[in-house]
Image (spheres, grey):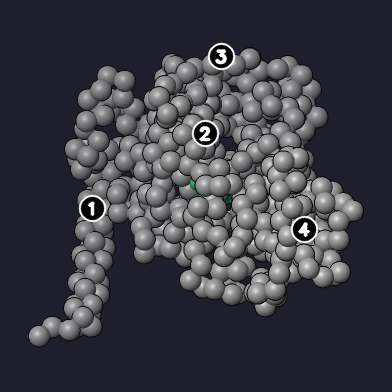
Amino acid sequence: METAESLLEEIVDLKKKLTQKEAMLRKHLNQKYEETESGPEKLTNIEIDKYSRQIIMPEIGMKGQQTLKKSSVLIVGAGGLGCPSALYLTGAGIGRIGIVDYDKVKLNNLHRQLLHPETSAGQPKVFSAVESLNRLNSFVQIIPYDMKMDRSNALNTVRKYDVVIDATDNVATRYLLNDACVLTSRPLVSGSALKLEGQLSVYNYSNGPCYRCLFPVPPPPETVTNCGDGGVLGAVPGVIGVLQALETVKILLGHKGVLSKRLLLFDGSDCSFRNVCLRDRIPSCCVCGNQPSVTALVDYEHFCGAMANDKHTKIHLLDDTDRIQAEVYHGLCTQPHILIDVRSPLEFEICHLPKSLNVPLKDLVLEQVIQQLKESIAEKCSSDNDFPVFVVCRRGNDSQKGVLALRKALHGLRVSVRDIIGGLHSWAKDVDPSFPVY
Ligand SMILES: Nc1ncnc2c1ncn2[C@@H]1O[C@H](COP(=O)(O)OP(=O)(O)OP(=O)(O)O)[C@@H](O)[C@H]1O
């Protein structure tokens, strides 16, 4: 009888053989391609067959397909928007596609970042993307850039491509890519998606505005939300990412009707699309205007105050003495205390620590809530010592804000308010590995 181990070995062996066959097929295709190739944009018979359903469209034709083959696109971000963009641009036969990302594939990316299979979890996103895209179309050259796009590398990278797609999730990179595109005269196809809504526009194209013409000043950090905090339904960035690919193809082919000077708003809740007219390029714009003051890339994280908003960045509002490690809380949690979880009720429903009270951060200013808390403290407090109140959140940022709000609200009471460093993530890492992480 076959054991599970021998079956597994067989699967590994089959996989190896498949990979070898795939490599042989790829070589064969490329040989054919080289044999029939006589100019950089000349299409082989295989390519003609492959792209025939778009070649027969009058809007594309042989000439258009050859133009796509000669073209290059840089996709910054291999996440929710970058994956669908890359899929359709690779399918369309763009000659060269660069993909920039510095992150690794996480399990909670997989519901929407469909270039990455489960087996890629933990791998750099760009390599996982290249592997999937190579499988899709061996005629397209996919170039990975496993790096964070910043002021030191943006200009040199952007210069190598005809069009840039912003598929990232933070304001600092939006300004960086905008300025890099203006300084190198590249169109920027910019998208965003959150929850059930998405947006799309093309900047710096055909005398249209750049991102800075519309948003000269970055939004306050606390008003910006990303998918990790606000959530997103996978198909929504799918819609926007595919439209980014469509706009890119239209730009490369010089079509009319490119989404410049307009902003597309998509609302997945009622499946509505709205086009909003945007202002023209502003002659006084500091980067694309007639007398620009920004002539080189700057420090965008500083400019946007974005560090505090970056989901990977830990904020430091409290001294370490005002905070405790998850393990220390574990040792203390059998003693009388109150633990306040300041996340939203929806997040609280995903997971929470035993006996924690859910009071969302924004509610810590409500008189009724504070009154109830004071009553609970009075009920539980039986000694003269300061009564311990602990605050927890997902990663240990909001809990610090919670501590500050509570100290103000409970001023005059004998309480000691501290938070758990690293929040529930640290609890899962240091105390209970079976605790869910999201
Ligand atoms: N400056 C940058 N350089 C390179 N890649 C970037 C940069 N800024 C953001 N990205 C990448 O853009 C992608 C955006 O993807 P997405 O909006 O789906 O979010 P995510 O970070 O993958 O997931 P989540 O927000 O749910 O944790 C991410 O893979 C991120 O690493």
Which residue is tagged 2?
191
Q: Distance between the residues labelled 4 and 1?
A: 77 Å
Which mark is nearer the camera, 3 or 1? 3
Q: Could you classify mark 3 by the number of other residues whose Cα lies within 10 Å: few (under 14), some (14-19), or many (20 or more)?
A: few
* Image position, residue 296 (x, y; %): 75, 39
Q: Nearer the viewer, residue 90 or 362?
A: 362
Q: Could you classify mark 2 by the number of other residues whose Cα lies within 10 Å: few (under 14), some (14-19), or many (20 or more)?
A: many
Which residue is tagged 3?
277
* Image position, residue 97 (x, y; %): 44, 45
**Residue under the point 64% across and 26% down:** 210
Whether the residues at callouts 2 and 1 have beta carbons within 8 Å, the answer is no
Vertical relation: 386 (above or below) 273: below
- Kind of residue sitting beneath label 1: Leu
- Kind of residue sitting beneath label 2: Gly
* Image position, residue 340 (x, y; %): 67, 56
Residue 378's disc number: 4
Left or right, 430 with reference to 122:
right
- Kind of residue sitting beneath label 3: Cys
Location of residue 185 (image quadrant):
top right
Left or right, 11 with reference to 258:
left
Vertical relation: 394 (above or below) 216: below
SS at badge 3: strand
* Image position, residue 197 (x, y; %): 49, 31
Q: How far apart are marks 4 and 3 (CA)?
A: 58 Å
Which residue is tagged 1?
29
